[in-house]
Image: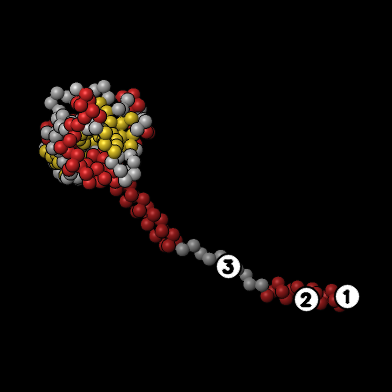
Amino acid sequence: MRDLKKNQKTNKKVRQNRLKQKKKPLNWRKLLHRTLRVGVATFSAVLIVVGGFFVTQLLLASDLFRVEQVTVQGNSRLKENQVVALSDIQIGINTFNLDLGLIGRKIEENPWVESAHVQRIFPRQLLINIEERQPVAIINLGYLYYLDSQGEIFKVLGAADNLDYPIVTGFDYTKAQEHNPEYAHQLRQIVGLLADLSQRKLFSLDQVSEIHFATRGGLSLFTLKGGVKVKLGYTDFSRKLDRLERIYTQLQPKLRLLDYIDLNVDEKVIVRIEQLKQLAKG
């Protein structure tokens, strides 16, 4: 009985010792200030969007941004008026109504144009910067086409086009149009070979009339003088041409008597003089 009473007294004391939590009153001023800030921010954002819309409409309708001049840079083969005609840009149109990427792609449809970039020069000018293809050879695919410095076949030759380039033979039209991987590789090799020849002095590009590709045998050159076949094979063209140049001054006067020059044997230049035999028989 004593213990029970003792426990009751203890529990009573514990209850009396508990702190009563009082509810804090709402800070209406702080709450109102926060709500006001959110409202102002929202209203400002809406105002900016609406204002931007109206400003855009004014700019689109304004005469301030009507195109008055189109300038072309980077062109040498194509005339400025040809490039402007390809762009289909109308003088007087608002500059913001133009899709610059689409205009560039239209210009690139011309075979001479490798790339075209269009930019606005505010307030009333457009600048078209083009990069033209550079032909390095003519490739015979039934019709004659230009081959550019990247190894791409890009244009069938017309009556007014320049023919003063080495001619490339041995390629099939269908496989070339299908971008056959072997053909693409060989065309890039030919471009590299032409670049090498253009830097040489003894056996240079002006002494080459034709480059021929054969699936069996690789690449061969034909000299402009005498039409002598120079067999190069598949690789190491630069090293093989170095070897030819060491004796080319002696061979050059006799080119009309030579049948072919073979550079495919390491450290040797094999020369066949079959025409000399035919002359002796005659």
* Position of residue 51 measured from the top left corner of the image (x, y, whole percent): 26, 45
Residue wearing tag 2: 9
Q: Amino acid at mark 3?
A: Lys
Visible in this render: residue 200? yes
The structure residue drawn at horizontal position 44% and vertical position 59%, both measured from the top left corner, is 31
Which residue reaches farthest front? 281
Q: Quadrant of residue 221?
A: top left
Q: Is residue 7 above or below residue 55?
A: below
Q: Position of residue 238 (x, y in %)?
A: 28, 44
Q: Is residue 95 left or right of residue 48?
A: left
For the question of whether residue 57 can be seen, the reply is no
The amino acid beneath tag 2 is Lys
Nearer-the-camera pick, 186 or 102: 186
Quarter of image, res 196: top left
| Spatial CA span between label 1 and label 3 | 38 Å
Q: Quadrant of the N terminus?
A: bottom right
Q: Earlier in the sequence, mark 1 or mark 3?
A: 1
